[in-house]
Image (cartoon, helix red, strand yellow):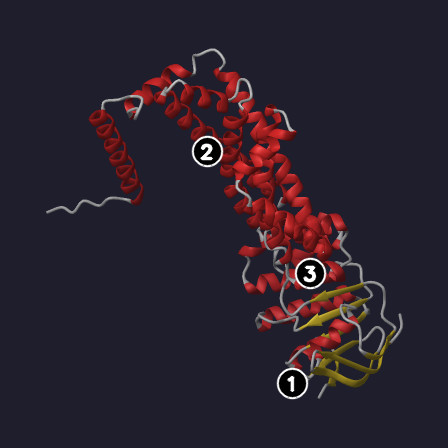
Amino acid sequence: MKKIVITENQKKLLAALTLLALWQAAAMLLGNRILLASPIDVVRRLFTIWKEEGFAASLGTSFLHIASGFLLAFLLGTVLAFLAGRVHTVEIFLAPLMLTIKSVPVASFIIIALVWLSSAKLATFISFLMVLPVIYNNVLAGVKGIGRKMLEVAEVFRMSSGKRFRYIWIPQIKPYLLSGCSTALGMAWKSGIAAEVIGIPRNSIGENLYLAKAYFNTTDLFAWTVIIVLISLLFEKAFLALLKYLFTLNER
Amino acid sequence: MNDIVLKNVSKSFGENEVLKDLSLTFPAGKVTALMGASGTGKTTTLSLLLKLIAPDAGTVTGLPEKEAAVFQEDRLFEDFSVLSNLTAVTGQTEDVIREGLESLGLSDAANEKAKVLSGGMKRRVAILRALLSDYELLVLDEPFKGLDEELRKTTAEYLLQKNAGRTVVMVTHDPAEAELLGAEIIRLS
């Protein structure tokens, strides 16, 4: 008898399909779209939701807010990590701040920040805040992990600061930065959307999620959730691909 | 060019005293080989010459401003091509670098990343990097490690030709290596 071989990817697909089937069965069993929308309803809604007025504006607004928060944290986190890795006093000074940001629940930050900022700026600030310690800690580990030996090469051959940065520091932090971004990109979207749901800025994904909840429109709630996951994944893949491309350019 | 003189030099790392009251002279324009058992302070002496460490006591005089080195390990920029490795450090034109690569049998490796090279190829790139740099003192720590006899001979010939009478201090365990460069041997104990 011929043995059937199932690959890892096929197994994962099978697991996902089983989960979808269970979800569909549960929705049919309950028979109440407010309690649980079925996956078929959600897929149908996805085909119509993008035609609605304000869809592109909602996507654009949320993307702009969250991506700018992420990019600000990416830049500042990297610069601060370099400073902290080279000057111990800076590391000591920043340690309690980074620990506080990491430990305080995101909901507390959102509510506190809502007192200071407009709802439009809230998602940017919260994404920035959640991403900053992740990038900072990852890059700091890379900077501190530099071997003495390569720095000796730079010293003996009297390499300029620019060349040291290009040939020694960038390759050193590369894996740490990629791993930090991979974790932080998902966090930026989760925290940014949470901030929007509480702050309810106009024409945002968060506002749509809030309205879906307010009107008990569970199908819309699920459809918007699928959209958030897709945008988050696309942004993650695109940003990491761009970062890898920039590293490749540096190595030419 | 001046002689390099170490006078009553001592150096410790924590409790471990590696050099004690060491006095040596490295004549200008000559090749000198330091030999001796492990732990006698050969690499520490090279680090002093490269100004990577300072002596705890004693003086080192006559050190030039510009130095180049072949370290015990190759220490290349692994993610970069051989050409990039050499231009980054030496500042030489691509033509000069390609000529050097050809002399050491590395023409085909110019565009390869350093991390994919064999041990012997990496070693020759490290040697070429030092030789194409602007220096007055060349420091070599077991420079021909990993090269077969034929390659040792051709690399040593190229090294002497490119060095053109500048001061060289090397560490080696093999008297034949010192002989290849016509070095005067100093034994540390």
Q: Is residue A127 above or below residue A83?
A: above
Q: Amino acid at mark 2?
A: Leu
Chain letter of the residue carrying label 1: B
The residue shown at (29%, 36%) is A16
- Residue beneath disc 1: B37
Residue A228 is tagged as none
SS at circle 1: loop
Residue at mark 2: A233
In which quadrant of the rendered image does the N terminus of chain B lie?
bottom right
Q: Position of residue B143 (x, y in %)?
A: 66, 70
Q: Is residue A7 above or below residue A89?
A: above
Q: Residues within 10 Å of mark 3 (few under 14, many from 20)?
A: many
Decide if residue A137 is on the left or right side of residue A34.
right
Give SS at disc 3.
helix
Per the image, label 2 sits on a secondary structure element best described as helix
What residue is rendered at 55% in x and 26% in y?
A199
Front residue of this view, candidates B39 and B78 = B39
Q: Please tell me whether mark 1 or mark 2 is closer to you in this view.
A: 2
- When asked about the image quadrant of residue B106, the answer is bottom right
